[in-house]
Image: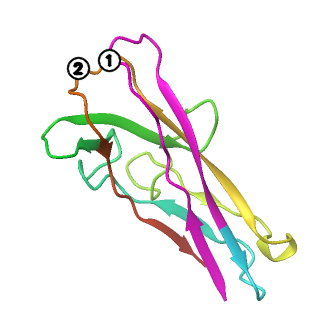
């Protein structure tokens, strides 16, 4: 049996006047107590608020404002982590059956600067899928 879990990406306070993006990280963890197929693929679905990847959007609780953000495969934040469609990429875990569990993969996340939004709590819901 294999389990997949993901930590939330928590950006903290967003400053609408900042000239620099707000970055954060999260993780996806895969652990198995049996031998899985060798190269599972992890995908992250589109934004529940925008329905897409470019950009994903967080929505303000109790309001209509949205805050653009995205998730990436790399710390340079150049490859959008998605489901492999529309210019997004997935993560293929190589040789999971040979690694000591759990296998932890980092999610790199960024909120672009200078978005004019109201103060509040913003969130989005995403689906993480692992394909064996």
Residue 8 is covered by the magenta coloring? yes
Q: Which residue is mark 1?
A: 16
Q: Residue at x 34, y 39 (%)?
A: 54
Image quadrant holding the C terminus, namely bottom right
Q: Residue at x 47, y 15 (%)?
A: 20
Query: What segment carries the magenta color?
Result: 1-29
User: Which label sits on residue 116?
Assistant: 2
Disc on the earlier residue, 2 or 1: 1
Q: Position of residue 92 (x, y in %)?
A: 65, 61
Image-based side of 45 in relation to 79, left or right: left
**Label 2 CA crowd tier, 10 Å (few <14, some 14–19, many 20+):** few
Q: Which quarter of the figure has residue 100? A: bottom right
User: Which label sits on residue 75?
Assistant: none
Given contact means CB atoms under 8 Å apart, are the residues at marks 2 and 1 in contact? Answer: yes
Q: Residue at x 59, y 72 (%)?
A: 4
105 or 91: nearer the viewer: 105
**Up-down relation of residue 34 to residue 91 (above or below):** below
């Amino acid at each position: 049996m294999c389990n997949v879990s993901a930590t939330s990406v928590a950006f903290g306070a967003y400053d609408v006047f900042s000239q620099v993006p707000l970055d954060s990280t999260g993780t996806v963890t895969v652990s198995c107590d049996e031998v899985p197929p060798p190269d599972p693929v992890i995908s992250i679905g589109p934004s529940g608020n925008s329905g897409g990847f470019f950009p994903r959007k967080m929505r303000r609780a109790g309001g209509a404002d949205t805050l653009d953000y995205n998730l990436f495969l790399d710390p340079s934040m150049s490859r959008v982590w998605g489901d492999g469609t529309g210019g997004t990429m997935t993560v293929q875990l190589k040789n999971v059956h040979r690694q000591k569990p759990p296998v932890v993969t980092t999610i790199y996340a960024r909120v672009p600067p200078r978005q004019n939004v109201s103060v509040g709590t913003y969130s989005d819901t995403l689906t993480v899928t692992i394909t064996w």
